[in-house]
Image: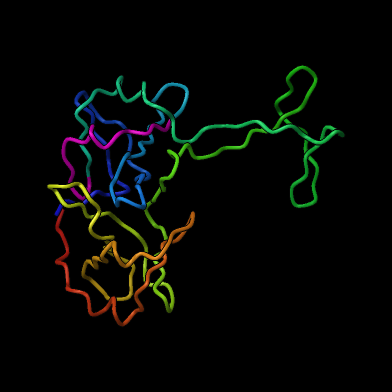
Amino acid sequence: MTDIPIKAKVECTDGPCGQSTNVIVNPVSHTVSHLVVHDKSLPDNPTRLVPVGKVASVTPQQIKLNCTKAEVAQLSPFIVSNFIQESASGQAYASGEGYHSQYVINDTAYDSVQAENIPAGELALHSGMHIEASDGKVGRLDALVLDPTSGDITHLLLREGHLWGKKDVAIPISAVDFCDADSIYLKLDKAAIKALPAVPVKQP
């Protein structure tokens, strides 16, 4: 099995390229389609959607890509800005307080709202997402485990900060019920997760 870390250093063929922040998955086929890379030195936008085919190798701490940083810079951004028009009074309201927009186009005021550029029908998983058993929270997501032959996601990996001490906990992808923006919900209860086969803690 191959682990895909969700918060790891990213290395291009010509040097460092920030870190991974998200993994984009197809919830039907249980496959990874993209990694999200964040690097402040990228032009115009610090985030990029990197197709999984550009991943050369991975360790728990690092993802190596088979492309240059300039090639990454040509990829689509992950975090994009949208502009929404303010009210007729020229003000927008948040928590009961008015504020003036910093964007004015043709005498019309707009506010910038950031959104994730997720391919249609897919999900963005990020490091630290809550893992919720049917009877409560059990930990946070650290990595995905892939079948090295098919590339299918086989398990969710919890490495630390969970209920069962200093061991890795690998939860079968078949145990996932549904996801939202912040949490992954399981069909299993805590007792069933505790009974899963132990996975040795990987050393750096």
Identified at 39% across, 65% down, the residue is 177
The residue sitting at the right extreme is: 89
Nearer-the-camera pick, 161 or 151 = 151
Q: How many marks?
A: 0
Seen in the picture, residue 27 relative to 190 is either above or below; the reply is: above
State which region is magenta. 46-61
Q: In the image shown, does 175 or 62 lie closer to the viewer?
A: 175
- Horizontal and vertical percent for residue 171? 27, 66
Residue 106 higher or lower than 13, as above or below: above
- Residue farthest top in this picture: 106
Position of residue 82 in the picture relative to residue 139 (left or right)? right
Residue 92 vs residue 151, the one in the foreground: 151
Residue 53 falls within the magenta-colored stretch: yes
Q: Residue extending furthest bottom?
A: 191
Residue 86 placement (x, y as % from top left): 77, 34
Q: Quadrant of residue 84?
A: top right
Image quarter of residue 128: bottom left
Q: Residue at x 43, y 38 (%)?
A: 119
Left or right of residue 150: residue 52: right
**Residue 173 percent location from the top left of the image:** 29, 61
Could you tell me residue 109's position as x and y percent? Answer: 76, 27
Residue occupying image coordinates x 57% and y 32%: 81
Residue visible at 31% across and 40% down? 33
Magenta segment: does it hold 1?
no
| Rendered image quadrant of residue 56 | top left
The image shows residue 29, relative to residue 110, as above or below, that is below
Specify the quadrant that holds the N terminus. bottom left
Q: Is residue 193 left or right of residue 64?
A: right
Q: Residue furthest front?
A: 28
